[in-house]
Amino acid sequence: MSPVKLTAVLFASAAAGAGLMWAALAGRAESDGINAAVAEAPAPTSSAMPASAPSGATQDDAYLDARSKGSPDAPIVVYEASDFQCPYCRDFWEQTLPLLEAEYINTGKIRLVFLNFPLTSIHPNAPAAHEFAMCAAEQGRFWETHDLLFANQREWSSLSEPGPYFRLLMDSLDVSRSDFDDCLASGRVRGVVMAEGQAMFQSGLQSTPSFVIEGGLLPGAQPIDVWRPILDSLVAAKRTP
């Protein structure tokens, strides 16, 4: 997906869905005294969030499909802007994502789309990790690589040169090493990663992980108790005649 298309997606807002989401968040914040940052976060504004990721015959769209988890027919699309070197992104992967998968993704309620948002100023190894994952995406192995990178984050994040370590991780993947080497050597996914990260900034996102849900913004590695009222309200609204 081009930076222009991606920025348009993230700025878009489905008014009814966003309203339900903010209502759920506000109620949660009042009752539990948590997630104050969410209540203060600005919601993106514009016309209408698409029901699914923009599609087309471009290579960028193929990359986006490879980073999507869940049914294409799911009523809700969640866009996750993430950084593989971010410890809070790892927390989300470890603590919240498995529950989201069991309750919402595997049941056809939501579709999750991963977006590259390497924070290069504080995470110098993130761009290489994202490039590694995108090369895996070319061979249909994005999510396996996604999990390996987060599972081993503490090992590679402090390395002065993470490339050799990533090549060791490649042995755990069912991929063509020659095709993988060609992808890394060509640098063809590097531009996709960096342009996508720039699109995140242009869309007003400032931290990782950040989630755009039906035009509303949910920042941070929130626990499942924060997610449930948001998603349940949105799914119910979609199913209401």
Image (cartoon, rainbow, N blue to C red):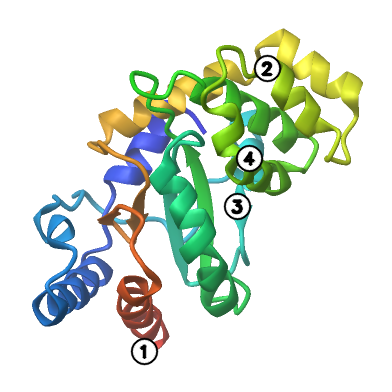
Mark 2–mark 4 CB contact (< 8 Å):
no
Disc 4 or 3, which lies upstream in sequence?
Answer: 3
Which residue is located at x 57 percent, y 45 percent?
Answer: 55
Query: x%, y% of residue 158?
Result: 52, 23
**Mark 4 = which residue?**
152
Callout 4: SS = loop
**C-alpha distance separating marks 2 and 1:** 50 Å
Disc 1 or 3, which lies upstream in sequence?
Answer: 3
Task: Select label 4 or label 3 by which is in front.
Answer: 4
Is residue 12 left or right of 87 when viewed as pictured?
left
Which residue is located at x 81 percent, y 14 percent?
Answer: 182
**C-alpha distance separating marks 4 and 1:** 43 Å
Mark 3–mark 2 CB contact (< 8 Å):
no
Residue 88, above or below 28: above
Label 3 neighbour load within 10 Å: few <14, some 14-19, many 20+:
many
**C-alpha distance separating marks 2 and 4:** 14 Å
Task: Select label 2 or label 4 by which is in front.
Answer: 4
Q: Quadrant of the C terminus?
A: bottom left
Identify the disc placed on residue 68.
Answer: 3
**Mark 1 = which residue?**
240
